[in-house]
Amino acid sequence: MKRTSPDLPTSKEEVPRWSFEDLVSDLTQALAKSTDLSLSDLSQKRFPITVPVQERLEEVLHELQFGTGAALLQFPADWLLEQGEEGSQRAFLGLCAHLGRPVTQSTDLQELCARVEVARSPEVLEAKHTQRRGYRNAQDQFLHNDSSIPAARGQGVCDVLAMLCFRPARSGGLSKMASARKIHELLQQQPRVLESVRHGFKYDAASVEYHPDWRQPPTGQEARPMVFEDVNGFPCVQYAKNMVETISAAYAKEGGELDSVKALLKNLEDACSDPAVVQYWDLKAGEAYLVDNYRWLHARTHFEDDAAAPRLFFRLWLQVADFERQKTRPCAE
């Protein structure tokens, strides 16, 4: 399917969706050809897909770049169970590698396709990012973008965020989503705040996590906007709690502006989490959402696990070549 205009979804049910139920045999074949490869070795060439799968992915990418910025993929839950946790993780990474390049998500664990779950293993519990990032526990999260390096859309660490539900929680654990367009509409009611976050802030580059797999190292000497429009005119928002920390650290060194900067960032936080903009997407086993990381903020509600079958999602950060290109052709029906 192709869409003619970026009509904003107001619920999960309205998100443009693509089922892969009729193509699981194609995915199974691709998986079989790559079983000897590590996750870091999976790529477009080494996870071969058929023309029908490629055509479906092209529609998904078109939606992400020029439509709503959101897509829902559907896989049979029993097929995922048949592949198991490792096979499903590999299939998701291999498939999404045809949309963009999966990049490392943490400096200490070198995760390409992260297991989003309550931390249990000593390796994960001891990792530095486990203490700073909310996907290793069951607590309610603040809405945010992924990656803490402020950069223009198409130039940052993550262009497309992809999340696959392998097993939902016993209760709770809904995906909280907010569109940048709705946040921008709220900020238009506060012109001074909007002007300030459009201008942006400096940040303390030394305190920002960086991995050489990412596009560019952090540089905090100049102000980076928190709210802006992409080349196609879509509103974009950058916000995360760790961004606030690094911005505050920069202004703490300069003195006088810190209180006003903190107040402006609190105004942005309030807009990003305003009930008027927040949607709740209840992903079932076999469902995956893919969103433009700058046009949609995401988070998760508190959840309770089943000890015998704990909640498990798989997450990818995708860098898409030429993601910021301007739309040059109309969407076909």
Image (cartoon, helix red, strand yellow):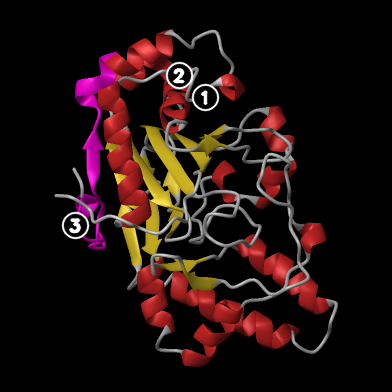
Three-letter code, disc 3: Thr
Q: 7 and 126: which one is in front? A: 7
Local crowd at mark 2 within 10 Å, few (<14), some, or many (≥20)? Answer: many
Q: Residue tagged by mark 2?
A: 47
Residue positioned most to the left: 333
How far apart are the alpha carbons under marks 2 and 1? Answer: 6 Å
Q: 323 and 95: which one is in front? A: 323
Local crowd at mark 1 within 10 Å, few (<14), some, or many (≥20)? Answer: many
Question: Residue at the spot x=14%, y=49% of the render?
Answer: 333
Name the secondary structure under disc 1.
loop
* Residue 276 locus on image (x, y percent): 32, 73
Q: 290 and 164: which one is in front? A: 290
Question: Residue at the spot x=47%, y=25% of the render?
Answer: 44
How far apart are the alpha carbons under marks 3 and 2? Answer: 31 Å
In this view, 291 is above or below 108 = below
Three-letter code, disc 2: Phe
Say whether residue 77 is visible. Answer: no
Name the secondary structure under disc 3.
loop
Looking at the rendering, the stretch of residues picked out in magenta corresponds to: 3-25
Classify the position of the N terminus by image quarter. top left
